[in-house]
Image: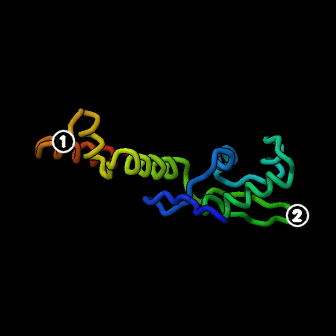
Amino acid sequence: MKTPQKVLEPLGIKKLSKTELEFMEVIWAHPEGIMSEQVYTMFSQALGTKSTILHRIVGKGMATTVRSGKHHIYIPKITKEEYMRAFFQEKMKKEFGITTFEGMTAAFCGRTELNPEEKERVRQLLEDLNQNE
């Protein structure tokens, strides 16, 4: 029986296994794309296994593949930061029931919620951070 794949809700993407994440790290390091043969040289698994791992990464929507002659070029569809954000948001929700930055901030302060003044300061901080990107 096939087990359902975990989905990281904030982005609607499927969670990568440890090995898939290792392969994806290589793909992220080459945002313009990397040839399958280059990826293959970086890992010790059998060729068929490496090919299967790359196929699963594409199937999970993390990368796209472009055929160039006999070669496949793997290009990331989302950034590492987007994946990590989704991963940590899902982890916070699952482990602690925290679904907002405000909730996370309160938890770090040892509380369950912030008062209105603190909420406004957090909102302003987030706005400032977004403007500085």
Residue 63 place in picture, x, y as percent = 65, 59
Q: Residue at x 43, y 52 (%)?
A: 90
Residue 65 place in picture, x, y as percent = 72, 63
Residue 99 place in picture, x, y as percent = 32, 52
Q: Looking at this view, is 76 or 103 the one in front?
A: 103
Q: Residue at x 23, y 43 (%)?
A: 122
Residue 104 place in picture, x, y as percent = 30, 42
The residue under label 2 is which amino acid type? Answer: Lys
Q: Residue at x 63, y 56 (%)?
A: 76
The residue under label 1 is which amino acid type? Answer: Arg
- Answer yes or no: is residue 26 visible: no
The residue beneath circle 2 is 70
In the rendered view, would you say 65 is above or below 19?
Answer: below
Residue 102 shown left or right of residue 66 in the figure = left
The residue beneath circle 1 is 121
Q: Residue at x 33, y 44 (%)?
A: 129
Q: Quadrant of residue 108?
A: top left
- Answer yes or no: is residue 62 visible: yes
> What's the colour scheme?
rainbow
